[in-house]
């Protein structure tokens, strides 16, 4: 008899053996990189504290472990769940328009400025523009990506920093001056 394969869990709380960071990983990637220290390891070798199909459950387990590490487990146990707290967010404080008006900013003018900025960038934000350069250009160098983004209104300094961040996060690679998205 063949045993039916168990469908993969969707979310896992994993830990870094280098710096003890905990984070939630979605799916089962081949490798994962610690967001704190940058250590990349095969996912199968990561310590998994819980695997679940519920993102909120994974988030709550991570938060509980962190609270216990800080001696705050009892205080954490008294809190509502993430799902319940998210419902409260909309009920607390002013909405965006009220906040802007109280700060002396015309909310309608701010919305119009946001639309103009989006239209000027072809509907992309700055980071999306840098990623698009890596996808669309043949063998893109740093200068090629900077030029591409600059033509679309992204400052050169921002583009260079964005490339560095993509490399550190393991979302891009650089070999002999040529960048690629992973």
Image: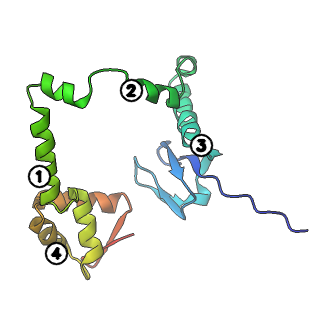
Quadrant containing the C terminus in the rendered view:
bottom left
Ranked by sequence position, the earlier of labels 1 and 3 is 3
Which residue corresponds to the image point at 14% horizontal and 22% vertical from the top-left?
102
Ranked by sequence position, the earlier of labels 4 and 1 is 1
**Residue ID for mark 3:** 54
Quadrant hosting residue 173: bottom left
Q: How far apart are marks 1 and 2 (CA)?
A: 29 Å
Q: In the rendered structure, find residue 144 and report the number of the disc placed on it.
A: 4
> For numbered disc 3, what is the local secondary structure?
loop
> For numbered disc 2, what is the local secondary structure?
helix
Closest to the observer, 137 or 63: 137
* Residue 130, percent from left and from top: 23, 64
Q: In the rendered structure, find residue 89 and report the number of the disc placed on it.
A: 2
Which residue corresponds to the image point at 45% horizontal and 30% vertical from the top-left?
86
Q: Distance between the residues labelled 2 and 4?
A: 43 Å
80 lies left or right of 104: right
Ranked by sequence position, the earlier of labels 1 and 2 is 2
Ranked by sequence position, the earlier of labels 2 and 4 is 2
Is residue 145 visible in the rendered image? The answer is yes
Q: How far apart are marks 4 and 1 (CA)?
A: 26 Å
Q: How is the image coloured?
A: rainbow
13 lies left or right of 144: right
Q: In the rendered structure, find residue 116 and report the number of the disc placed on it.
A: 1
Ranked by sequence position, the earlier of labels 3 and 2 is 3
């Amino acid at each position: 008899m063949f045993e039916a394969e168990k469908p993969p869990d969707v979310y896992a709380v994993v830990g870094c053996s280098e710096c003890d960071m905990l984070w939630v990983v979605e799916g089962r990637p081949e490798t994962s990189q610690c967001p704190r220290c940058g250590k990349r390891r095969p996912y199968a070798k990561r310590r998994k504290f819980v695997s679940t199909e519920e993102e909120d459950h994974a988030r709550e387990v991570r938060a509980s472990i962190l609270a216990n590490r800080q001696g705050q487990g009892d205080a954490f146990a008294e809190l509502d769940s993430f799902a319940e707290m998210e419902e409260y967010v909309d009920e607390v404080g002013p909405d965006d328009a009220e906040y802007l008006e109280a700060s002396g900013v015309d909310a309608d003018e701010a919305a119009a400025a946001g639309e103009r900025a989006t239209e000027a960038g072809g509907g992309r934000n700055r980071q999306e523009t840098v990623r698009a350069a890596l996808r669309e250009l043949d063998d893109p160098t740093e200068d090629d990506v900077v030029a591409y983004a600059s033509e679309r209104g992204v400052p050169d300094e921002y583009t260079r920093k964005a490339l560095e961040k993509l490399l550190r996060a393991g979302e891009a690679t650089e070999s002999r001056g040529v960048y690629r998205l992973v």
